Image (cartoon, rainbow, N blue to C red):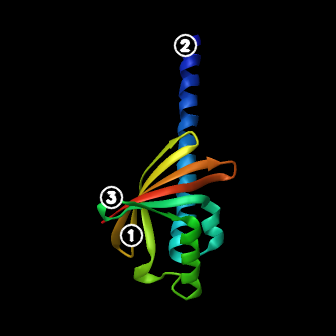
Amino acid sequence: MKQIFFIVFIFLLMKVTAQNAEQEKEAIKRVIQTAYVEGLQNEGDAGKIDSGIHPDFNLLGIDKGNAMWKYSIKDWKTNVLQKQKKGELPRTGKDKVSVKFKSIDVTGTAAMAKIEFYVGEKFTYVDYISLYKFSDGWKMVNKIFYKL
């Protein structure tokens, strides 16, 4: 009889853990969609950007000759807000950015999301976004990418 209760307990614990993992993945998708896709890429909305991107976030890339470069969210956000003031944002139609989530891996308060980045229908980048869960929720902290 104790074995049956133990098995039921383990089953319920696994179910709750799986539900929590799915909730965390959905929260991460919302952060990326709101802060990155809508705020940073399509609208130039500072509030949306700040809601899901940590102030110490950096975009990292590689130039020819294997030299790495870093682009801070402060500089990126400034550039995006200037585009909005010039009327270059919000994006519409064929210029609108969308993403497809390929995978999200969560371990405790750390996560990695792999997404496909589209401009209109054109598949343009594969992004790898690192996130941490802070007291106020998930925040993007780093991004690397591969340009197609």
Pointer 1 residue: 118
Q: Is residue 1 visible?
A: no
Q: Residues within 10 Å of mark 2 (few under 14, many from 20)?
A: few
Side of 122 where 90 appears, left or right: right
Given contact means CB atoms under 8 Å apart, are the residues at marks 2 and 3 in contact? no
Image quarter for residue 117? bottom left
- What amino acid type should be assigned to the residue bearing mark 3? Asn
Side of 48 where 125 appears, left or right: left
- What amino acid type should be assigned to the residue bearing mark 1? Tyr
Q: CA distance from mark 2 to mark 1?
A: 52 Å
- What amino acid type should be assigned to the residue bearing mark 2? Gln
Residue 66's label in the rendered image is 3
In the image as oriented, which residue stretches furthest toward the right? 135
Given contact means CB atoms under 8 Å apart, are the residues at marks 2 and 1 in contact? no
Residue 96's label in the rendered image is none
Q: CA distance from mark 1 to mark 3?
A: 26 Å
Depth order, front residue of 10/52: 52
> For numbered disc 1, what is the local secondary structure?
strand
For the C terminus, which image quadrant? bottom left
Q: Residue at x 30, y 64 (%)?
A: 64
Q: Earlier in the sequence, mark 1 or mark 3?
A: 3
Pointer 2 residue: 3
Q: How many marks?
A: 3
For the N terminus, which image quadrant? top right
Image quarter for residue 34? bottom right
Q: CA distance from mark 2 to mark 3?
A: 58 Å
Return the x and y of residue 60 as percentages of the image width and height: 45, 59
Return the x and y of residue 111 as percentages of the image width and height: 51, 47
Depth order, front residue of 2/63: 63
Return the x and y of residue 95 as percentages of the image width and height: 42, 80
Using the image, determine if residue 82 lies above or below residue 129: below
> For numbered disc 2, what is the local secondary structure?
helix
